[in-house]
Each structure stands twice: as C-alpha cells, then as structure tokens.
Image (spheres, rainbow, N blue to C red):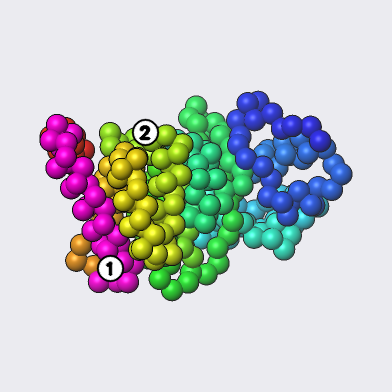
Amino acid sequence: MKKFNRAVHKSMGQLPPILRQLIGDADIAIATAEFNEYMTELATEFHTQLSMDIAPADIELKPSKKLFGQTVSLDYIASGSVGSVYKMTIGSHAFAFKINRRPTTGELAVMPLQKRARGLVNKIHFGSVFEYNGRRFSWVLSDYISQDHKNSFESAMEKLYFAYITKGLSITDAHPNNFKNGKLIDVPSLGMRNGAIDDIANLSRTEQKLVQRLAYYIKTDDIKNFEKLVASSLKQHSPVVNYMFYAMKFAKGATFAVGKTDAFSTKLRRYEAVINSAKQQITQTNPVLSAIAHKISGTHDK
C-alpha cells in the first residue's frame, strides 16, 4: 500500500479500521484521497449554507453519492462555540463528524497527543483543512458515542489527574458538557503544560519512571509502598518529590478541591500528606532551595 501524502492533502490521521475493511485491496492512497475529497465537499456545502445565514441546526447535508459503495446519511447533533457536530452513518457504521465554523485547526493540532491520553479522549481518526472564501477551516471524523454513563465527568477527571501527573497533559476547559462516557469530546482543550516546576519533561527518564510508579500506587491505593518509594526518592531522587509536590497540588484544581468529600478526593489527601511531609524535609535541610521554590511557586500561582 502507498503512503498517503498528508502534506499534499493537508490532512492528518488514517481511515477508521472499519472503513479500511470496506476498501479491501484497493490502493489506500487513492481511497484516502477519495474520502478526504468526499468529506471536504460536505464541509464546504455546510459553509455555503452557513454563509446564507442559515442557522447551523437548520443546515441540511445530503450526500449526493455513496462512499466506498456504502450509503451515507447525516443527522445534526449539536453546535458549540466553534463547530457543529453530525452523526454520520456510513453503511451501518456511525461516526461523529465535526465541522468547524471558525477558521481553526484545533483538533488537528492536538491529534498527536492522543497516544498520550488513551482512555481519556475520544478517538479522532481523520481530519483535514480546507479553504472557503479565502479562510482555512477544518473538519474531523471521530468515534460516535451514543450514550453517557453515570458519573462520566468524575471518572474522566480521575483519568485526567493521572495523565496530568504522568504524561504532562492538561485540559483548559474541564466542563461536564465536554465529556461523554468518561472521555473528552472537546479535544482542542487538551494540551501539554510547560510549568516551571510541574513539568515532567524536567525530570530524567529514571525519575519519570519513579513518578509513574508513585501514580500507580495512588491508583491501587497502596499507601505503604507509596510511602516507601517517597522515602527512598527523598534520599536518592529528590527532584521526584519536588515534582510530585507541585504536580499534585495543581492537578487537583477545582475538581479535587480540599473540601470535596467524594472517595477519590479523600484518598488524594492521604497521599498528598505523605508528599507534603517529604517536601517539608527537603526545604528544612536546604533553606536556599526553600526560598527559590517559594519564589517560583508564587510566580506559578499567578
């Protein structure tokens, strides 16, 4: 199979596996180009009607031809501040088709982060940039989530907490409406943080593995091994303790505030107490480090 030239087609990602099965032995490059063209025509038609002052909810998208031999239908779902989402059914397979109404390529910019956030974000399979009236817009095709389970937002926040600590990921708009079935559906709000202190990239590979181990002990509620590893890190890898202190502090945010009484927030406070105690030992034995950390922390809070 030939490799699809993303630079030429201004697209990212791959066709969903179920669609690749429909292609069979056909040339994947040709099939992908056909798919990109098909979807871009729909997105362009959306903007044509939008330019006629038709409200997004009233825009009708009716594909004029089949795709890979399959009938295609679109059902309007909802519109946010940036884009509109349709349930797109290709044959018997449903996907979420988002067309951005504003000239943005936010989803494409964060697609490379998906591997870092497995289980946290809704999978984007394919996206592309197109021009309309001299401006660049984008569309993306994602998994379609039909239902939402109970406590979806809470479970997503737990995933985010550990992704924040172990992967350096953060979400700028952690709002219940942006999550479904425990997954982030508003992908552009996902990003990498680069704080002065709580940036895992500042740690060595060995130290990052220790952080992952500490996070694992929090997940499994193994406070004894957590305490042992913190104690050994305090002697041999103090940057790990410093990192965990600030990362755990800022990862909480409003979701895991001090006053919350849910089981997860209560558990976190036990582990934070261990880290706080270890951090205190570091600052007591190194006044210079303490002053520097205090100064940087004040800057970071702002």
User: Dividing the picture into quarters, in which one does residue 129 lie?
Assistant: top right
Residue picked out by circle 2: 202
- In the displayed structure, does residue 134 sit left or right of residue 126? left
Q: Residue furthest bottom?
A: 150
Q: Pinpoint residue 202: horizontal percent, then vertical percent.
A: 36, 33
* Rendered position, 220 above or below 199: below
Q: Amino acid at mark 2?
A: Asn
Residue 267 drawn in magenta: yes
Residue 91 seen in the figure: yes
Residue 164 seen in the figure: no
Q: Which mark is residue 250?
A: none
Identify the mark nearer the N-term, 1 or 2: 2
Q: Predominant secondary structure in magenta? A: helix
Alpha carbon of mark 1 to alpha carbon of mark 2: how far? 29 Å
Estimate how packed mark 1 is, as few (under 14), some (14 to 19) or many (20 or more) residues with alpha carbons within 10 Å: some
Q: Nearer the viewer, residue 67 or 202?
A: 202
Q: Nearer the viewer, residue 151 or 299?
A: 299
Residue picked out by circle 1: 266
- Residue in the image at 57% along x and 48% along y: 124
* Rendered position, 86 above or below 34: below
Which image quadrant: the N terminus?
top right
